[in-house]
Amino acid sequence: MKKKKIYYIIAVLITANLFSCNKILELEPLGKLTFEKFWSSKEQAVAAVAGLYSKLGQSYGMKASSVSPLECYLYWGELRGELVYNNPGRLASNVLDRENVSNLTITPSDVITKYTEFYYVINGCNQAIKYIPTILEKDPSFTTEDEKNLLGEAYFCRAFAYFWLVRAFKEVPLVLTPTLDDTQDYNIPKSTMEEVFAQIASDLEIAKESLPRWYGMREDYSRCRATRYTALTVLSDVYLWMAATTNDAAKKTQYYDNVIKYCTEVIDSKRFYLMPGSRWGEIFTLGTSGETIFESYASQPNNQTNNLYGWTISNSVFTVPAATDDLFAYTEIRDYRSATPPDGTTGPVRGSQISINASSRNINKYNRSTNDPRWIHYRYPEVLLMKAEALAHRNPDNAANLTQAAELIHEIRLRAYGVSYHPRVEVLSTYEMDNVIIDERGREFIGEGKRWFELVRFASRDNFAEPGLLINRLMGKLSAVEQLTMRPRILNPESWYLPLNSSALASNPKLVQNPYYK
């Protein structure tokens, strides 16, 4: 990251109106001010925090020199798995290196390894954490509750950005102070995965105590801005990762207990529910449904659009292979999440939209020609599945825990199939439950940026005790010849993480390339 570019981008970030969630986030740009003068009123603080959400949901057309966060979510979290592909021949010649992601041949020079956009967000968060506490003495209308809530949002956004980075790269520079001018030292070494996760958890623990449970009667605010329930949900995901990557038995037990406790609080809040299967499409095309816990806001009337429709429908850049169909082949009952939902003639009513298209191979979740479908970071079914995962591993092979986990999955299947006689989970071991959960996650979250990370988490658990949970699924998407060349690579867990970008290494001599790519 070039010093002048960093300073300029951050100055723009804290003064720009980049994101809107109706009134509160529809603020005009406040001009170019010095940092100290900028942080002088409640309106300026709200505008700055709004910019953080905007940056996390930013989408722009594929470029040869940069990559937007929304594109990273798909490439880092989805395209490396077995359920979504980069459709050959659909990319322009100057961005063809993106195909290396789904081909599992990514290199440090590929643009998709650039993490700059996330550090812009992190620096904006660091600015907010430093300066928001100074506003009380400057603005009489700014209350201690305002300060608490806005700081909670800043801590949440910083943790959220680092959570994406640590899962993608494993080790990254941990920057906790704001960039103010060109005299600062930008050459920071990587922190370990354990250190980064500890910071993420710490930030989210602060956030959950600082954020409001809900933003009054505003459903849209409460689903596109962080609430206590948003922080609890992300924390549950973080603790699942921490449990999967530690060899400390006591810590592992505590992490699983945290997941169970936090997921239970979200469930018991009654703020969230599974949308009826017949209204599946509304979750993504209309947004802010009762199922959404955290999404990136989009509003076509306010000229807010993203590239999801073009990437998945009109240009078919991303497509689903036969392996995706195989997930639904285990039962004859039609699933609203599949390519053949109930037809409405016998049994459940017909759905308004299918999840994937069997002929075009499109991901139909984002079938919104106005180019404003919602990108949803977390939905209620993920809370149910995370709790099921924690229960299964809190006491491995415990029959009572496996039964509880199965009942949580049955809640999701009741929505998915629309009938009480949906397929039942019958397992005798935690390993069997892992396979059930991985497959259920695949059906539920196709194209939502989760597949690769969930495979890595399950395969990393207990010092890579079951790497086949990832490897066997990846092998299924490769030809016989590709398996011969790619299997040795995939067998090495260090290859499950991305390389640091070559330009970042060149500009920061303290950075060390990730082991597999040296």
Image: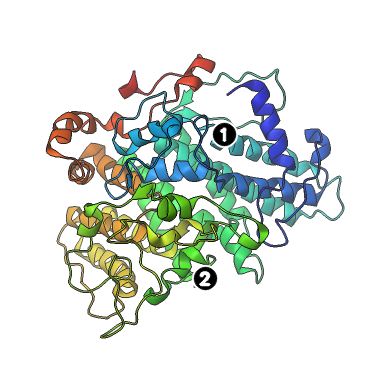
Q: Quadrant of the N terminus?
A: top right
**Which residue is outermost to the top?**
509
103 is higher (above) or lower (below) than 240: above
Q: Regarding mark 2 in the picture, which secondary structure is present there?
A: loop
Q: Is residue 374 left or right of residue 101?
A: right
Lower position in the chain sequence, tag 2 or tag 1: 1
Residue type, numbered disc 2? Arg
Q: Is residue 211 above or below residue 103?
A: below
> Which quadrant of the rendered structure holds the C terminus?
top left
Cα separation between marks 2 and 1: 32 Å
Packing grade of label 2 (10 A; few <14, some 14-19, many >=20) is some
Q: Residue at x 29, y 65 (%)?
A: 339
Q: Is residue 301 visible?
A: yes
Q: Residue at x 25, y 37 (%)?
A: 463
Q: Residues within 10 Å of mark 1 (few under 14, many from 20)?
A: many
Amino acid type shown at disc 1? Tyr
Residue 191's x, y, as percent? 47, 27
Mark number for residue 271? 2
- Check the image and report above or below for 234 versus 358: above
- Residue 265 image point, x, y percent: 47, 64
